[in-house]
Amino acid sequence: MADRPRIVGIDLGTTNTLVASVRNRIPKIVPTDRGNLTLPSVVALSSRGDLMVGGVAKDQMVTNPRNTLWGTKRLIGRKYNSKAVEDLKSYFPYDIVEGPNGDAAVMLGGKLYTLPQVSSFVLAQVKTIAEQFLGGPIDAAVISVPAYYNDNQRNAVKEAGKLAGFDVKRIVNEPTAAALAYGFNRGLDQKVLVYDLGGGTFDVSVLHLAGNVFEVLATGGDTFLGGTDFDNRIMEYVLERFREENKVDLTENPIALQRIKNAAEAAKIDLTLIPNVVIDLPFIDERKGKPLDLRIPLTREFLNSLTGDLVDRTFDICDRVLEEKGIARSEIDEIILVGGQSRMPLVQQKIQAHFGKPPRKGVHPDECVALGAALLGDSLGSIDAVTLLDALSMPIGYALPNGRVKRIIEKNSLIPLVKSFRLPPPKEPGSPFIELDIYQGDSDLLVDNEYLGTVRVPSAVAGRKIDFRLTEECLLQVTVEEASGMRKVDLATRDTPEQLKRALQEAAARNSPQGPSAGSGSDNGGLLSRIGSIFRRG
Ligand code: AMP
């Protein structure tokens, strides 16, 4: 066949993974062997010791939680000794341990797996699915990542792709891919806002589309705001109602909680289509040997009142991102929806009210990222290739002795780019080496940043030029001026620097029960805080 694709676009999602390919210039999602368009991003080990991926793995999530890995997109490319991993450890029922180079890793059936390995199992499955459906080998891929992913996370996803047997041609930001699915080859001149409300995170990006030039103007988001928060609100309500009616507290009953969590999400999704549902869970508990059933009606209107403030929070973020760049709401020509939670009617109504126009129909919120990645892959090297001008979502800098970060590349800088500065003298006078610990993050405080690695060069080059180059995939490359010219320096990926360890310990001490509270205050301090953190995020 003349037009058989050899490259696919992959949306490696927190909840689900999608793969798409382009045939005769039209991108399409490749269905899985179960006939679905999505493959759950879940890897598990069965009780017989078989490694399982996708739907079969997800099926054992409730019965075998310690050997079922889900949500690993939040962990990949993170250091074990980072604040992010520390916070996430209690969210997942499986074991998170320290792997090679101080990276976070996971245990499955008593064996350690790196997170790129775990993702590679999902990607390898997707590769097989695509090869079977498209009828031949697929050797290349474009893989999407969240815009806020740092350098480590991007490299880790690239490595996962390689382990799965792909030649990863490009890593592309998810909102950029979504915009591509909307605007590719349409000759548009527009400002579009990509509104991505997924299971666990909210992301917003504003792009300028000029023909096939896609320029990211600004990005922002909240990594702790998503569909799970909507489920939690329903859960909280259901538990309260049940307690009032039956004088029974279900928060101590993990099986009941898991059933209510699943039912809450199902009810929420049903309420997108129909105005009333009943949450019906027979034999949820027992009292004096008699079964107790849970039966609670829920209307769409009531769901809206339970969750309206969550939707409003997304607009605060949108407004902030627009303000940062001095863009007026009225300048936005189109709003593109991404992520399952954006299907909720309230979200769409509120978008219309906030921006004065309805979101764009016709771009599928679940599929557009994979479709855009496939279009990008197909266009690479062709005459109508797209130009992506992306923006850095989090600043990059190096550690100062006072526990702060000296910013080198600012947020929203257009990439690719090069930033040059002069190498400072070594920290200790007389030391044979200059060491710069490189960090990425929004905060000025080192402890809230992610450690990327260390530049280690001889002291003789103090005062010479050092270049930080960000490639079009937003990957950092460092070169240092030497007598013979500019030399590339590999970042030493060593364990957590001492300075960061100390800062983390101090932060942990501050956040201990005796210290000031670090709570976000979003779950009203009521039932949810007692339910346990596993149920906080899906
Ligand atoms: P994603 O991360 O994009 O797969 O989004 C998953 C989130 O979208 C989960 O919280 C789902 O419960 C939610 N979701 C999926 N479909 C719908 C729907 N039709 N209405 C409301 N929420 C949905």
Image: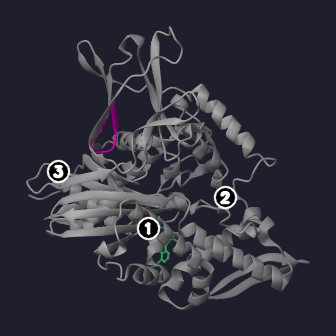
- The verdict on residue 470 being magenta is yes
Q: Residues within 10 Å of mark 3 (few under 14, many from 20)?
A: some
- The verdict on residue 483 being magenta is no
Q: Classify mark 3: helix, strand or loop.
A: loop
C-alpha gap between disc 2 and disc 1: 29 Å
Front in this rendered view, residue 37 or 198: 198
Label 3 or label 2, whichever comes before in sequence order: 3
Query: Residue beneath label 2, please?
Result: 534
Q: Is mark 2 within 8 Å of ligand 1?
A: no
Query: Residue beneath label 3, please?
Result: 380
Label 2 or label 1, whichever comes before in sequence order: 1
Q: Classify mark 2: helix, strand or loop.
A: helix
Residue type pointed to by label 2 = Ile
Residue type pointed to by label 1 = Cys
Front in this rendered view, residue 151 or 18: 151
Residue type pointed to by label 3 = Leu
The C terminus lies in quadrant: bottom right
The N terminus lies in quadrant: bottom left
C-alpha gap between disc 3 and disc 2: 42 Å
Q: Residues within 10 Å of mark 1 (few under 14, many from 20)?
A: many
The spot of residue 426 in percent (x, y) is: 48, 16
Q: Which residues are magenta?
A: 469-477
| In-image side of 344 versus 218 (left or right) | right
Label 1 or label 3, whichever comes before in sequence order: 1
Query: Residue beneath label 1, please?
Result: 318
Q: Is mark 1 within 8 Å of ligand 1?
A: no
Q: In this rendering, which labeled residue sits more in front, label 1 or label 3?
A: 1
Task: Please report the residue visible at 15 percent of the width from the left and 66 percent of the height from the top.
Answer: 185
